[in-house]
Image (tube, helix red, strand yellow):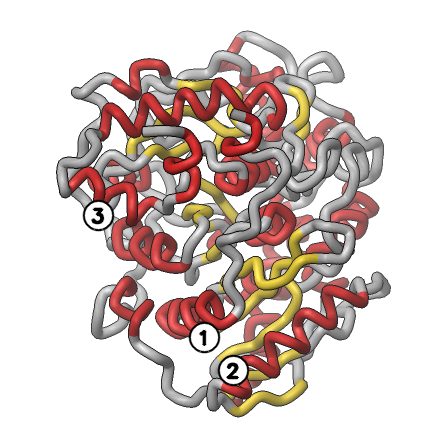
Amino acid sequence: MDLATYAALDGTALAAMVRRGEVTPSDLAATALRAIEVANPTIGAVVEAYAEAARPAAASGDGHFCGVPFLIKDVGQHFAGRRVEYGSRLCAGMIVAADSFFGRLVKASGLNPVGRSSTPEFSMALCAENRLHGSTTNPWRRGTSTGGSSGGAAAAVAAGLVPVAHGSDMGGSIRGPAAWCGTVGLYPSRGRVSAGPMMGEGGHGMTQNFVLTRTVRDTAAALDALGVPQPGDPFVIRRPERPFADYVTRPARPLRIAFSAAPLMDAPVDREVAAAVGRVARVLEDMGHHVEEAAPAIDLGRIDAACREIWYFGFHRTLDAYATRTGRRVGPDTVERATLRFYTYARAQPVERFLAALDDLNMVRRSVGPFFQAHDAWLTPTCAQVAQPFGVYGMDIDLSPEAFLVHEQRPCQFMIANNVSGQPGLSLPLAQHSGGLPIGVQLTARHGEEEVLIQLGAALEQAMPWRDRVPPLHVARLG
């Protein structure tokens, strides 16, 4: 298969070719590895390619994505025998001991891991820049951030290296990179994708593993494949009557949709981003939905303070355990400056602040809940601004934990509420900035109602298509 044809197709289309016998999983893996060889020296999205992925025994699978090439994010321990380094010199060379449930479900879906994608150190910043592997550039503009922390995944999907890539999201880390790189990114409902068997829930319930894609239908199919309850999960959430993939072609009933692009903090929303939200609102109204300008009350200052206590509680113990595992010591030679600041902060953190923060976030959830009794969905920007140059965000910035989170929150202000409430959020690449960078627009639905987002996303994909937009740094152009 030639690179241009491969890079133009989504995972569903490639898998259909495998089922028809037009191409083998080994052929697809070999093509993906060739795409990585051609484009990755420019983009820097892949930190390790798996040469053996093209062997027939490795490139197999009977699920929806039979043989479709896939990248695993360099965070989380999902595939036994593979390296996971968290973008950190502290963890260089670390090996995963056992498959996670997510890893098993990926294999069962037919997705074929062909490599590992870049992330900031410990997935804590709005970029895919780290001192271990270097910087990943946005395919739309060289020297521009991909967003984070699933930035390597988003860049790889946007540039045509793979059609589907793993991401994880604790504060916007799937949706933000999707918005800045021009891909589709879904944060699933809390509990939809199992975090087991090594933990009950990731990020105290705020983290979900999932994927980035180029099409809504790939996102829906991945939700069917990966959102499968596993033994020992702390709870099983609502599922729709039909597979999520069925909702791609089922029009939504008339919905009550609120929209807003007003800033949630003292940080501006780019005028073109705000205008894009307004255009999408009008398209939805033309589809027959009831659309009005409204927003829930969201106290970002309270959320940031609580997340600081929750996300980094025990962070020092985690890093100390990695240091023991790799025979290194936590310090300026092994971790970046902001990481070291958080490590020091965590060492002095009293448990009382952690417990109080859990209560605070429960109050935030309850304050947001009534809004979604009156509205079926909320439309906002994904990010308040388009992608920024290298160096603006990253873990090698010397800021206190308090200042760091405020700095990172400015572009991400519309995403964190989903992680707190557990509600699903879908970022769609529905517009392009006059400067040439993608604009992502986010839809939020009630907990457990991803099918609403799939229906709206599929309808918007038809009404405001993005598939013909190809970034300058793309496999078809670099090859």
Q: Are marks 2 and 1 in contact (CB under 8 Å)?
A: yes
Mark 3 crowdedness (10 Å alpha carbons): few <14, some 14-19, many ≥20? many
Task: Give residue 446's mark.
Answer: 1
Q: Residue at x 63, y 79 (%)?
A: 259
Mark 1 crowdedness (10 Å alpha carbons): few <14, some 14-19, many ≥20? many
Q: Is residue 467 above or below residue 397?
A: below
Task: Give residue 372's mark.
Answer: 2
Relative image position of residue 6 (x, y in whole percent): 37, 36
Question: Hey, which quadrant is residue 54 in on the image?
Answer: top left
Q: CA distance from mark 1 to mark 3?
A: 27 Å
Farthest-out residue, top: 327
Q: Pointer 3: what residue? A: 64
Q: Foreground: 448 or 400?
A: 448
Relative image position of residue 387 (x, y in whole percent): 72, 47
Q: Is residue 124 visible?
A: no
Q: Foreground: 66 or 170?
A: 66
Q: Secondary structure at mark 1?
A: loop
